[in-house]
Image (tube, rainbow, N blue to C red):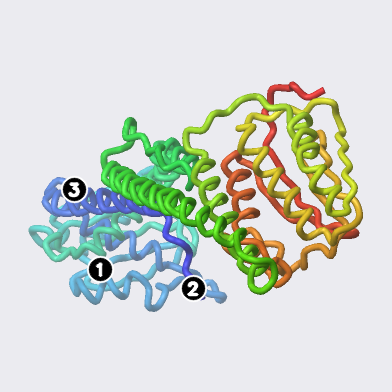
């Protein structure tokens, strides 16, 4: 059995309800000694009468009797001096030693009297106190007299019976219902203060660790948690900056020796290992260049402006067209609209498109058409008619430094950089299903400015 996830709302509700329940119990415990000390209206006779009224039943033959194993039997076991006499119609039932004065009082009881209290019924003190009550029972209307219970011997369960029998039960019930209703009302109000913090946390992007959770308006109980979270973000930001600086420094330092190495390789005689060395140096140079691109386009604090996606994609297609034609491809460009505006960094988006077009030239099979299409819903599709991307590899190819078996000369950073650029713009880069070849899609968020035409 799976336990439910811990809930702050449930805990607040339970705590509110439990607090009221404890307060109610304390009230009852406070009333208990007060009731026992009341000499003018002792509760001992009330208990005897209420127990008898609760257990009085009529049998199928018309007789009346006291229910076995009811309140009367348990009360009589704790108070041996208890007595009562119950009369329903012409039938009566008695229990215990009933003072003679009780019989006389019942015989002279006026018909209009519903309740009466007497003292000194056969003895002096609490044991001689009695009560007479007209009440409706399961055996029908009855007149019940009871007494013989000394207040000093009344226990808390006896007192609760007294409270319930006198219709005081609705007080704790109403209190419990009000406590539960109050808890259900208060919990959302208390938790409402968490919404700004939750919203601020949702706005923190892994590539932009400058944002912090606001401390203003946070309840003091959660303030240490917010501060600890902000301190963790600060440490992450420092570590990320150090990593980026390290990668940038390494990439910069590698460019000079790679340029020297490339110069020596180019000066080698043709044939032999020269083609292999040229390919290796090219891969290293390409990797270093993309590492620098990744750092330059880390997107933190980058410039954003209104960019016409149609114009940008058309220009990127034109830049790659000579290379594509040289490798045996045809180029095609189309757009659903003349103008589709996004809020972006044009240099970063151009780099993403250039990487996708370069990928199509490298892996499109050396024939067919490379097509770029801009749609009205802020998407750019770059497709070729080559062998395509296997379904199981459509996510792996976006991982940094990941290369598939057909990607002999790649370094595994181009597609990763494309996805990072898109995610920094609030969009996504994916491989979508295509009838033939590979189709990569750049999905940008809407600007909401209505500038499309």
- Nearest to the observer: residue 328 or residue 13: 328
Q: Of circles 2 and 1, which is in front?
A: 1
Q: Are marks 2 and 3 in contact (CB under 8 Å)?
A: no
Q: Which residue is mark 2?
A: 63
Give the side of residue 3 with respect to residue 411, left or right: left
CA gap between label 2 and label 1 equals 20 Å
Q: Which residue is mark 3?
A: 41
Q: Which residue is mark 1?
A: 83
Crowding near pointer 2: few (<14 within 10 Å), some, many (20+)? few
Q: Residue at x 52, y 39 (%)?
A: 299
Q: Residue at x 72, y 45 (%)?
A: 442
Q: Secondary structure at mark 2?
A: loop
Q: Please tell me which of labels 2 and 3 falls first in the chain.
A: 3
CA gap between label 2 and label 3 equals 33 Å
- Nearest to the observer: residue 114 or residue 183: 183
Quadrant (top left, top right, bottom left, bottom right) of the C terminus: top right
Crowding near pointer 1: few (<14 within 10 Å), some, many (20+)? many
Give the side of residue 240 with respect to residue 1, left or right: left
- Can you tell which quarter of the image residue 198 is in? top left
Residue 223 image offset from top left, x and y in percent:
28, 41
Q: Please tell me which of labels 3 and 1 falls first in the chain.
A: 3
Q: Secondary structure at mark 1?
A: strand
Residue 368 image offset from top left, x and y in percent:
91, 55
Give the side of residue 431 with respect to residue 13, left or right: right
- Can you tell which quarter of the image residue 265 is in? bottom right
Tell me if I can see residue 196 in this picture: yes
């Amino acid at each position: 059995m799976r336990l439910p996830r811990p809930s702050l709302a449930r805990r607040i509700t339970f705590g509110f309800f439990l607090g009221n329940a404890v307060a109610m119990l304390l009230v009852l415990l406070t009333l208990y000694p007060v009731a026992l000390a009341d000499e003018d209206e002792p509760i001992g006779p009330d208990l005897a009468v209420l127990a008898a009224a609760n257990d009085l039943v009529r049998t199928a033959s018309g007789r009346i009797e006291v229910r076995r194993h009811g309140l009367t039997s348990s009360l009589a076991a704790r108070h041996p001096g208890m007595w009562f006499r119950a009369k329903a119609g012409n039938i009566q039932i008695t229990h215990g030693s009933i003072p003679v004065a009780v019989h006389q009082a019942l015989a002279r009881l006026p018909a209009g009297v519903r309740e009466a209290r007497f003292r000194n019924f056969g003895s002096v003190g609490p044991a001689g106190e009695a009560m007479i009550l007209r009440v409706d029972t399961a055996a029908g209307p009855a007149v019940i007299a009871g007494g013989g219970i000394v207040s000093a011997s009344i226990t808390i369960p006896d007192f609760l019976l007294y409270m319930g029998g006198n219709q005081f039960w609705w007080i704790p019930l109403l209190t419990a219902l009000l406590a539960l209703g109050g808890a259900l009302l208060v919990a959302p109000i208390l938790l409402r203060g968490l919404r700004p913090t939750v919203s601020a946390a949702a706005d923190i992007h892994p590539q932009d660790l400058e944002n912090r959770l606001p401390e203003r308006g946070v309840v003091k109980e959660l303030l240490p948690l917010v501060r600890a979270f902000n301190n963790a973000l600060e440490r992450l930001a420092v570590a990320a900056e150090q990593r980026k600086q390290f990668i940038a420094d390494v990439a910069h330092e590698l460019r000079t020796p790679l340029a020297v190495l490339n110069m020596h390789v180019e000066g080698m005689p043709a044939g032999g290992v020269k083609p292999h060395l040229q390919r290796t140096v090219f891969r290293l140079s390409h990797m270093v260049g993309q590492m620098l691109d990744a750092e330059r386009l880390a997107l933190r604090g980058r410039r954003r402006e209104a960019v016409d996606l149609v114009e940008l994609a058309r220009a990127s297609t034109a830049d790659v067209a000579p290379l594509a034609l040289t490798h045996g491809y045809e180029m095609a460009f189309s757009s659903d609209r003349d103008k589709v505006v996004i809020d972006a960094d044009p240099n970063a988006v151009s780099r993403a498109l250039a990487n996708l077009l370069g990928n199509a030239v490298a892996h499109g099979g050396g024939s067919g058409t490379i097509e770029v299409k801009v749609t009205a819903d802020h998407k750019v599709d770059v497709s070729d008619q080559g062998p395509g991307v296997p379904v199981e590899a459509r996510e792996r190819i976006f991982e940094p430094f990941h290369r598939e078996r057909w990607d002999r000369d790649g370094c595994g950073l181009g597609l990763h950089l494309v996805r990072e650029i898109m995610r920094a713009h609030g969009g996504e880069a994916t491989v979508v299903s295509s009838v033939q070849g590979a189709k990569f899609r750049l999905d940008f968020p809407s600007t909401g400015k209505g500038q499309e035409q």
